[in-house]
Image (tube, coloured by chain):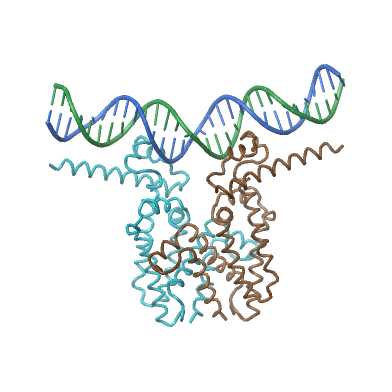
Chain colours: A cyan, B brown, C blue, D green
Amino acid sequence: MGIKERKERDREDTRLLILDAAKKLFTSQGYEATTIRKIAAEIEYSPTTIYLYYKDKNEILYALHREGFLLLSRQFQALAHVDSSFERLKAMGRTYIRFAVENRDFYELMFIMKEPLLNLNTACGSPQDWEEGVESFDFLLQTVEGCQQEGYFKGQDPRLLSMWIWSTVHGLCALQMHGHLDHVSRHQLNEMADQDIINQVFESFVRSLEQFR
Amino acid sequence: MGIKERKERDREDTRLLILDAAKKLFTSQGYEATTIRKIAAEIEYSPTTIYLYYKDKNEILYALHREGFLLLSRQFQALAHVDSSFERLKAMGRTYIRFAVENRDFYELMFIMKEPLLNLNTACGSPQDWEEGVESFDFLLQTVEGCQQEGYFKGQDPRLLSMWIWSTVHGLCALQMHGHLDHVSRHQLNEMADQDIINQVFESFVRSLEQFR
DNA sequence: CAAATATAATTAACACTGTTAATTATCAAA
DNA sequence: TTTGATAATTAACAGTGTTAATTATATTTG
């Protein structure tokens, strides 16, 4: 009696088909262009069919949201081999920034837009199924604690410290992506190359961190 | 022949009437609820009338955008009397955070949303009529340079330094406003009060800055 | 004062959006 | 072969920003 199983498989397939179409639209044309109707057209289904597989648009967005965190998480894991904690911390920052620059729409979805997270906070009271984000933060926290063993950041609470380090790098990405860094720099740093300014600011940040002992 | 002048005055009045209605809706009900039709209903005009005074919705948003920067700029100016540059820097951070918390929608408009700035970058090639933002950054820059004269942040480029200090505080506000700080803290800092977490992280940041000499 | 003109404001409509209710097509079970 | 469930569709609703065509209201001219 494998008929029920096949139906479930079919359902899962269609769910994935929808998600893939959404991802394709999303990464190629951005959030604005990713409408229910366009997703439906992409997979040659009727728009309302999508509602048989996803409660609403936010649920699709949230699914992509999770994929984004998986992607970033994997890039972080590739840094686990770096022995020196402080070197790892720097590498994490560069990876984070590169991820934001190369995956603007994903980054927007993961850290800037508020819609997908609203769904999360209402849908699931227990935030256990939302591990990817916390996982990455844990990795940061461990790295910061490692830095403290190497003599950096003495006497600081590693959790608060991790939070504002994250804030700095996120702030950099967010301001850059929306043109604020460029805008300010055009008035202050005429000689600098626009495209590289986020990296220059980050390196300035790193130089400061190196003095924290 | 003061009739032309009166007409111009009338026009300006209506423009302001629209803007005030938009601001009222915006600050009381947020961005989502601020639709052209609702603004029109608020001032008891037809929706299309608004287009006689503003090119499109972004132009209204951009006008509010400017008001927000004026508001923040004024709060910063109140700190000009603080003699110690480092104390002033700390006060600016607290003011910035308080502004973001107390004026969530304005903050969103000014630093998080990208729509109003798009309009700016296309409309005016010369960014001279967009002074409020740069003005505040200048104030930060001067304060940072003052700190350097007081012995802080030795050997650092004050412009890059100012940028990542801004990034840190903006990142804090942005992550907090969209629930990311709370989310992470629920896993890491169970004992801490949610509402105050942004301030705790900021004070941790300040303690670190104090070691930068 | 009456007619012509400029401009302010409105109505109607377009092309979208997310989403729901009612209806039709499809396919396994009785 | 008919019944019943479920998958998919059509039609529609209540919105959105925005534009073209039309009406109302003043101002200037004959």
Image position, residue A68 (x, y; %): 38, 56
Q: Residue at x 32, y 59 (%)?
A: A128
**Residue occupying image coordinates x 39% and y 81%:** A149
Q: Quadrant of residue B19?
A: top right
- Number of labels in the image equals 0
Return the residue nearer the eye: A169 or B23: B23
Give the image location of residue D8, x and y in percent: 31, 34
What percent of the width, then of the height, locates residue B1?
87, 37
Horizontal side, residue A74 vs residue A210: left or right: left
Residue B179 rendering spot, x and y as whole percentages = 45, 58
A199, A146: nearer the viewer: A146
Where on the picture, by quarter, is residue A182? Answer: bottom right
**As displayed, is residue A187 above or below residue B213?**
above
On screen, residue A19 versus residue C30, left or right, reads right
Q: Say which of A22 and A122 sits in front.
A: A122
Quarter of the image where one finds residue A179 = bottom right
Q: Quadrant of the N terminus of chain A?
A: top left
In this rendering, position of residue B83 left or right of residue A103: right
Q: Residue at image x 63%, y 73%? A: B144
Residue at the spot 73% in from the left edge and 42% down from the top edge: B13
Above or below B128: residue D28: above
In this view, the residue in front, A185 or B90, is: B90
